[in-house]
């Protein structure tokens, strides 16, 4: 983690942007927040009323900005909608945009890059794909997470903008964005095996510090107020778009 970078971008940069907006007469914004503001929730599914107790710099900086938006709404008449993403996943269904990080840390692309390695002639037994913990209090022992497709994130942003445009002042609102259903690490790997038709092997490693067993959110408020509904609710649908992008763009494994 790089706390300095998170505070520079998520706090300093965001506040400078908002101040410039207000100075220019712009008083409406959609803010990309995160479910990391909840930290280790004590109830599932997570609703917007759950305590926000982040456990890392990323979540703390996003929560700080949510607080700033509340304060700015009260004094400067800034209308904002904070969208608390759960696990963003998948790629553009048309193959134009995809997910690529360096280093890669997200589960679905990591699993698919392992499938690509095997597809290109690698020995499945030589896998370096790791599962961090298989002894959680979940049905199969691996972490359960709520995944939301990037296309559904886009449609939620559009719905949020439409609300900001149609309502004179909304203050500072916040909405969870998730499917409302969780998928375990093993279920994600199984979906990748089905989609790719490849035998994907893995290694079991120790748990990572701070990993909660289950993170699944309720998006009931977004459905009721924003009229938003995820289009990609099944894991296989999400994986198909990610695998198609990797294939079309000749992404190479490392």
Image (cartoon, rainbow, N blue to C red):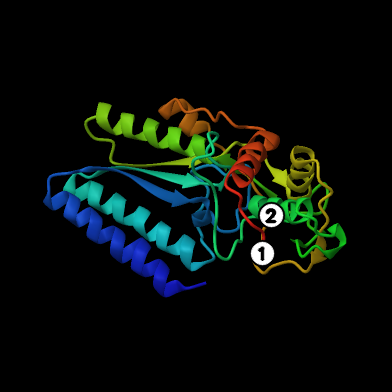
Label 1 and label 2: CA atoms lie apart by 8 Å
* Residue sitting at x 29%, y 62%: 13
Side (left or right) of 160 relative to 101: left
Q: Is residue 254 above or below residue 92?
A: below
- Do the residues under discs 1 and 2 have CB atoms within 8 angstroms? yes
Whether residue 208 is visible here, answered yes or no, is yes
Side (left or right) of 81 relative to 195: left
* Residue sitting at x 54%, y 59%: 101
Percent coordinates x, y for residue 73 in the rendering: 24, 47
* Residue sitting at x 35%, y 57%: 65
Mark 2 residue element: helix
Quadrant of residue 178 in the image?
Answer: top right
Percent coordinates x, y for residue 91 in the rendering: 55, 42
Of 56 and 156, nearer the camera is 156
Residue pointed to by mark 1 = 254
Rate crowding at label 1 as few (under 14), some (14 to 19) or many (20 or more) other CA atoms within 10 Å. few
* Residue sitting at x 79%, y 49%: 186
Residue pointed to by mark 2 = 113
Residue that lies at the very extreme toward the right in this rendered image: 125
Percent coordinates x, y for residue 25 in the rendering: 12, 45
């Amino acid at each position: 983690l790089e706390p300095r970078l998170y505070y520079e971008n998520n706090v300093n940069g965001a506040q400078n942007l908002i101040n410039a907006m207000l100075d220019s007469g712009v008083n409406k914004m959609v803010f990309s927040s995160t479910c990391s503001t909840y930290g280790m929730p004590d109830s599932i599914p997570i609703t917007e009323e759950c305590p926000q107790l982040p456990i890392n710099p990323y979540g703390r900086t996003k929560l700080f900005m949510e607080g700033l938006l509340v304060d700015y709404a009260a004094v400067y008449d800034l209308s904002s909608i904070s969208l608390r993403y759960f696990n963003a996943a998948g790629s553009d269904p048309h193959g134009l945009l995809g997910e690529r990080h360096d280093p890669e840390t997200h589960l679905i692309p990591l699993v698919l890059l392992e499938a690509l390695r095997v597809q290109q002639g690698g020995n499945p037994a030589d896998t370096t794909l790791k599962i961090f913990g298989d002894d959680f209090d979940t049905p199969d022992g691996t972490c359960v997470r709520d995944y939301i497709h990037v296309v559904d994130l886009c449609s939620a942003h559009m719905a949020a903008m439409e609300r900001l445009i149609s309502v004179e002042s909304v203050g500072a609102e916040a909405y969870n964005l998730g499917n409302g259903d969780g998928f375990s690490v093993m279920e994600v790997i199984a979906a990748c095996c089905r989609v790719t038709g490849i035998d994907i092997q893995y290694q079991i490693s120790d748990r990572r510090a701070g990993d909660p067993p289950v993170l699944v959110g309720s998006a009931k408020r977004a459905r009721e107020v924003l009229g938003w509904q995820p289009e990609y609710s099944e894991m296989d649908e999400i994986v198909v778009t990610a695998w198609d992008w990797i294939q079309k763009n000749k992404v190479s494994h490392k």
